[in-house]
Each structure stands twice: as structure tokens, then as C-alpha cells.
Amino acid sequence: MSWSELERLVAEAEADSTLRAALHRCRTRAELILTARRLGYRISRLDLQRAQAEHLLEEQVMAAAVGE
């Protein structure tokens, strides 16, 4: 399980509407991970947590930059 697998999943989901729809139907992180694994992506709960933390940090930085 690796960060690069999560990046690959995101890139391919952006390019493939069927994959994107399958992931969009997931209601929980666990379901998302299971779906991704069934599709051949080796991602983990920690990969998703790290991605979420980085996304939140980016949003905070952007909000701070706008407020300056």
C-alpha cells in the first residue's frame, strides 16, 4: 500500500468517469478502500488520512493567503 497508488487512483478516476462514479458511490472510507482494492489499487486507511490532512492544510493556507 502506498501513496503512489493513491495518486494513481486519483489520476485515473479524474480521467475515467466509470471509475469516478464507482468511487463516488462509496459511503465510508472503509468502503472506498475495499472498492479501490477490488479494482487493483493497493491503498490503505493511512493513505486516505494523509491525503485528507494535506487537503485540509492546503485549504487553510489558501484561506490565510486570501485573508492577507
Image (cartoon, rainbow, N blue to C red):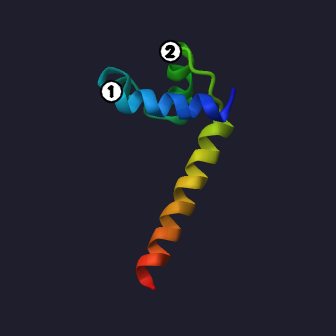
Looking at this view, is 3 or 34 the one in front?
Answer: 3
> Pointer 1: residues within 10 angstroms few (<14), some, or many (20+)?
few
Q: Quadrant of the C terminus?
A: bottom left
54 over 44 or under it: above or below: below
At 50% from the left and 20% from the top, the residue drawn is 35
At 34% from the left and 24% from the top, the residue drawn is 16
Dot 2 corresponds to which residue?
A: 39
30 over 37 or under it: above or below: below
Looking at this view, is 28 or 68 the one in front?
Answer: 68
Looking at this view, is 22 or 10 the one in front?
Answer: 10
* Mark 1 secondary-structure assignment: helix
Residue 32: percent from left, percent from top: 50, 29
At 55% from the left and 35% from the top, the residue drawn is 7
Dot 1 corresponds to which residue?
A: 21
Amino acid marked by disc 2: Leu
- Left-right relation of 28 to 48: left
Query: Outermost residue, bottom direction?
Result: 68
First along the sequence among labels 1 and 2:
1
- Left-right relation of 27 to 56: left
At 59% from the left and 40% from the top, the residue drawn is 48
Mark 1 to mark 2 CA distance (whole Å)? 13 Å
Looking at this view, is 59 or 23 the one in front?
Answer: 59
- Left-right relation of 23 to 54: left
> Pointer 2: residues within 10 angstroms few (<14), some, or many (20+)?
few
Question: Is disc 1 in contact with disc 2, using a CB cutoff of under 8 Å?
Answer: no
Q: Quadrant of residue 11?
A: top left
Query: Outermost residue, left direction?
Result: 17
Amino acid marked by disc 1: Ala
